[in-house]
Amino acid sequence: MPTALRLFRYVAIAEACSWAGLLIGMYFKYVAATGDLGVKIFGPVHGALFVLYLAAVLYAARQARWSRATIVVGLVCSVPPLATLWFERRVMARHREPVTA
């Protein structure tokens, strides 16, 4: 697997995990009303990984020669929670090496 796609994959998974952490932190802050420590921790982490994901999409797109439509879908998938996992699976399935016997 080329380095750009490997980097993209790791960042997409990390971004989704940070989304999950932020959502859990928001639950404890706003629903359970037990404190905002989770938001204080995962907010900046998610923000940094969000920006890194956008850069990773553009870098992988350039290296793997993705179409403009694929790039747009990848960038849009940064907004809904955990959508980066769906996009990562879709892209990696297209770039997976065929299995030969």
Image (spheres, rainbow, N blue to C red):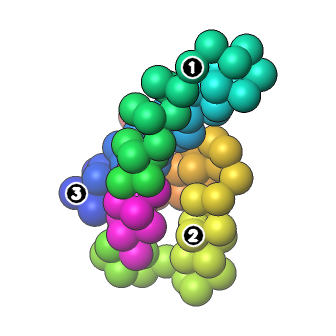
Q: Amino acid at mark 2?
A: Leu
* Residue 10 at x, y percent in the picture: 35, 43
Residue drawn at (44%, 35%), measured in percent from left and top?
40
Q: Residues within 10 Å of mark 2 (few under 14, many from 20)?
A: some
On the picture, is 98 further left or further right than 59? right
Residue drawn at (57%, 70%), measured in percent from left and top?
75
Inspect the magenta stretch and tell me whether residue 40 lies in it. no
Q: Amino acid at mark 3?
A: Thr
Q: Which mark is residue 3?
A: 3
Asked if residue 55 is positioned above or below residue 25 in the image, the reply reads: below
| In front of the other: 97 or 42 | 42
Q: Residues within 10 Å of mark 1 (few under 14, many from 20)?
A: some
Residue corresponding to mark 1:
35
Residue drawn at (35%, 60%), measured in percent from left and top?
52
| In front of the other: 34 or 50 | 34
Mark closer to the observer (3, 1): 1
Q: Which residues are magenta?
A: 49-58
* Residue 96 at x, y percent in the picture: 45, 50
Residue drawn at (40%, 75%), measured in percent from left and top?
58
* Residue 90 at x, y percent in the picture: 61, 52
| In front of the other: 40 or 57 | 40
Of mark 3 and mark 1, the one earlier in the sequence is 3
Of mark 2 and mark 3, the one earlier in the sequence is 3
Asked if the residue under mark 3 is in contact with the one under mark 2, i.e. CB atoms within 8 Å, the reply is no
Which of the 4 quarters of the picture holds residue 60?
A: bottom left
